[in-house]
């Protein structure tokens, strides 16, 4: 079933206004149902968030949902193709 996916996973790196990363993380967890995981990170971005957006347009989801959260300054989105775990091997 090539190209037939039920869940589309995206990872979004989020840069927050200084001092607001934990507040933004809490807001994401509490208000966005597509949220899978939220991690604080070091480096250029403050948060890394896994979203399961299903058949939604990832670009529209990020611009209309994630970027609208107060104190989000910038985002960088990665679209996942396959998940490789001990129990799942799509190859």
Image (tube, helix red, strand yellow):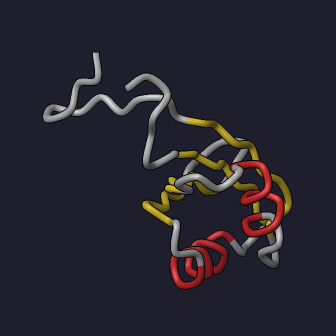
Q: Residue at x 77, y 75 (%)?
A: 69
Residue 16 position, x and y percent, is 76, 64
The C terminus lies in which quarter of the figure?
A: top left
List the single residue furthest toward the front: 1
Q: In this picture, is 4 found above or below 23?
A: above
Quarter occupied by the N terminus:
top left
Q: Classify 39 as above or below 71.
A: above
Question: Which residue occupies the foreground of this view, 42 or 88?
Answer: 88
Residue found 44% across the figure and 60% down from its top: 37
Residue 56: percent from the left, percent from the top? Answer: 65, 56
Residue at 69 percent of width and 49 percent of height: 58
In this rendering, the count of numbered labels is 0
Front one among 56 and 65 = 56
The quadrant holding residue 25 is: bottom right
Which residue sits furthest top? Answer: 91
Identify the image quadrant of residue 64. bottom right
The location of residue 5, given as percent across then percent down, is 45, 39
Locate residue 13, reporting x and y percent. Answer: 66, 48
Please report the residue visible at 83 percent of the width from the left and 54 percent of the height from the top: 74
């Amino acid at each position: 079933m090539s190209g037939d996916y039920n869940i589309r996973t995206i990872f979004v790196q989020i840069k927050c206004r200084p001092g607001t990363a934990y507040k933004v993380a809490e807001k994401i967890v509490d208000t966005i149902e597509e949220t899978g995981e939220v991690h604080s990170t070091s480096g250029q971005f403050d948060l890394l968030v896994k979203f399961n957006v299903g058949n939604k347009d990832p670009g529209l989801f990020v611009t209309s949902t994630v970027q609208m959260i107060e104190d989000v300054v910038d985002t960088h989105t990665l679209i996942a193709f396959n998940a490789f775990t001990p129990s799942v091997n799509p190859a």
